[in-house]
Image (cartoon, rainbow, N blue to C red):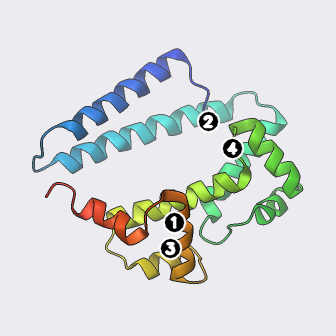
């Protein structure tokens, strides 16, 4: 979660509204490119807000939480367990779980899984990589383990999820 000042909130809301309006428009040849451009602008704006927060005065817990989020982004492919991240941060898994809950309202494992799901969705939507390759890339022991994890979290199989996007606009 990012605390936003009024101006940032208004700007991001406007960008999300524009993205939604673009999505709702009738199909045209460059629609996906236009939506991708809006997404890129949104991501840049969020990165700028995050950077300005990081450079400000921050308490130890928020700094530790931000380090955890950065570690997830860097190691989600190889590390799926809270204990691995807590070791990297030099705190107990319990303390990391509590810290996560206080700073984001979500558990540490939930944040790790969220990153895995986001990356899996991105790969399924924007690449033609076989599902078993995606499973290996995300460090799942087997494609079945990945499929079970994905279906448990998204309520649809990876194959069916991909089909939703390959049939979009047809």
Using the image, determine if residue 61 lies above or below residue 12: below
Using the image, determine if residue 94 lies above or below residue 127: above
Residue 52 appears at what percent x and percent y?
60, 31
Q: Quadrant of the C terminus?
A: bottom left
Earlier residue among tags 2 and 1: 2
The residues bearing labels 1 and 3 have C-alpha atoms spaced at a distance of 5 Å
The residues bearing labels 2 and 3 have C-alpha atoms spaced at a distance of 28 Å
* Tag shown at residue 106: 4
* Residue positioned 60% across, 32% down in the render: 2
Using the image, determine if residue 50 lies above or below residue 148: above
Question: 142 or 41, which is in the foreground?
Answer: 142
Res 83 quadrant in image: bottom right
Earlier residue among tags 4 and 3: 4
Q: Quadrant of the N terminus?
A: top right
The residues bearing labels 2 and 1 have C-alpha atoms spaced at a distance of 23 Å
Q: How crowded is the residue under tag 3: few (<14 C-alpha within 10 Å), some, or many (20+)?
A: some
Q: Which residue is mark 1?
A: 150
Instruction: From the image, state whether disc 4 or disc 3 is nearer to you.
Output: 3
Question: 59 or 158, which is in the foreground?
Answer: 158
Q: CB under 8 Å between callouts 2 and 4?
A: no
Q: How crowded is the residue under tag 4: few (<14 C-alpha within 10 Å), some, or many (20+)?
A: some
Q: Which residue is mark 2?
A: 1
Residue 140 appears at what percent x and percent y?
59, 77
Q: Which residue is mark 3?
A: 147
Is residue 76 left or right of 151 when viewed as pictured? right
Res 70 visible: no
The number of discs equals 4
The residues bearing labels 4 and 3 have C-alpha atoms spaced at a distance of 23 Å
* Residue positioned 52% across, 15% down in the render: 6
Q: Secondary structure at mark 3?
A: helix
């Amino acid at each position: 979660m990012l605390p936003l000042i009024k101006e940032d909130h208004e700007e991001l809301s406007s960008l999300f509204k524009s993205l939604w309006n673009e999505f709702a428009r009738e199909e045209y040849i460059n629609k996906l490119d236009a939506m991708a451009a809006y997404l890129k602008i949104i991501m840049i704006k969020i990165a700028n807000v995050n950077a300005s927060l990081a450079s400000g005065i921050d308490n130890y817990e928020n700094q530790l939480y931000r380090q955890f989020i950065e570690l997830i982004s860097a190691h989600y492919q190889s590390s799926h367990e809270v204990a691995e991240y807590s070791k990297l941060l030099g705190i107990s898994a319990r303390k990391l779980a509590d810290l996560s809950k206080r700073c984001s309202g979500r558990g540490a494992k939930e944040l790790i899984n969220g990153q895995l799901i986001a990356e899996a969705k991105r790969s399924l939507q924007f690449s033609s990589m076989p599902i078993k390759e995606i499973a290996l890339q995300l460090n799942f022991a087997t494609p079945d383990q990945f499929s079970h994890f994905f279906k448990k979290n998204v309520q649809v199989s990876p194959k069916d999820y991909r089909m939703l996007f390959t049939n979009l606009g047809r």
